[in-house]
């Protein structure tokens, strides 16, 4: 949201023939259930990112890392700007528990956990990405924003099955 990626990249595959031919089946609710606000921009200066982490065009962690630093190194003619500060800015892990709490208050079905569990899960994911980058000869630090962004991109399109609400849940939601 902060970088405004949705201004050029949508995260919703529309039912338009061109979208379906290029990106696959239209987006499903489970693909964006954790996004708030939704990143359903309509402009297509860049590719749709709805299934960036789980589609036929899935990119590797090192591709995303290099692409954020200089998109033209990997995509000739790209008009996407460089985002070098993502490599140096620290991810605010201390803010995650409160962000998740707010998302839950807004109705996003986030999994909870203690602040320590949330931070540990985020760091484990980041360390996995950093280890993968090391195999590609990239020395990265797990506490950087670029790693958090790669983690986000690699989750896009991994749909969850949404169970219908029970009668009790519907009644609670109505109150």
Image (spheres, rainbow, N blue to C red):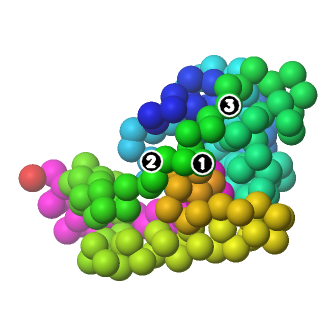
Pointer 2 local density, CA inside 10 Å: few below 14, some 14–19, many at least 20 = some
Task: Using the rendered image of the protein, determine whether residue 22 is visible from the camera's viewpoint.
Answer: yes
Q: At numbered mark 2, what does the secondary structure look like: helix, strand or loop? A: loop
Question: 145 and 50: which one is in front?
Answer: 145
Residue carrying label 3: 82
Vertical arrangement, residue 73 with respect to residue 46, above or below? below
State if disc 3 and disc 1 touch (CB < 8 Å): no
Q: Is residue 85 magenta?
A: no
- Left or right position of 159 against 61: left
* Mark 3 → mark 2, Cα distance in angstroms: 24 Å
Residue 150 place in picture, x, y as percent: 63, 54
Q: Earlier in the sequence, mark 1 or mark 3?
A: 3
Pointer 1 local density, CA inside 10 Å: few below 14, some 14–19, many at least 20 = some
Residue carrying label 2: 35
Task: Using the rendered image of the protein, determine whether residue 12 is visible from the camera's viewpoint.
Answer: no
Question: 48 and 171: which one is in front?
Answer: 48
Q: Nearer the viewer, mark 1 or mark 2?
A: 1
* Mark 1 → mark 2, Cα distance in angstroms: 23 Å
Residue carrying label 1: 87
Q: Which mark is residue 63?
A: none
Vertical arrangement, residue 10 with respect to residue 115, above or below? above
Numbered range of the magenta stretch: 151-174
Residue 93 place in picture, x, y as percent: 37, 62
Q: Which residue lies at the image location 56% right of the left edge and 23% below the top edge? A: 7
- Left or right position of 73 against 34: right
């Amino acid at each position: 949201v902060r970088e405004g990626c949705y201004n050029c990249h949508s995260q919703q595959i529309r039912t338009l023939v061109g979208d379906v031919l290029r990106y696959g089946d239209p987006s499903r609710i489970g693909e964006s259930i954790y996004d708030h606000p939704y990143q359903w921009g309509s402009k297509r200066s860049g590719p749709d990112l709805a299934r960036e982490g789980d589609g036929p065009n899935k990119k590797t962690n090192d591709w995303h890392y290099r692409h954020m630093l200089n998109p033209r190194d990997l995509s000739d003619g790209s008009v996407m700007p460089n985002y070098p500060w993502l490599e140096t800015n620290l991810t605010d892990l201390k803010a995650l528990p409160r962000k998740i709490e707010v998302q839950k208050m807004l109705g996003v079905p986030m999994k909870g956990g203690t602040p320590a569990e949330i931070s540990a899960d985020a760091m484990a994911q980041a360390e996995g990405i950093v280890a993968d980058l090391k195999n590609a000869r990239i020395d990265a630090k797990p506490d950087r924003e670029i790693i958090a962004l790669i983690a986000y991109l690699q989750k896009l399109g991994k749909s969850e099955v949404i169970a219908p609400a029970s009668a009790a849940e519907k009644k609670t939601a109505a109150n």
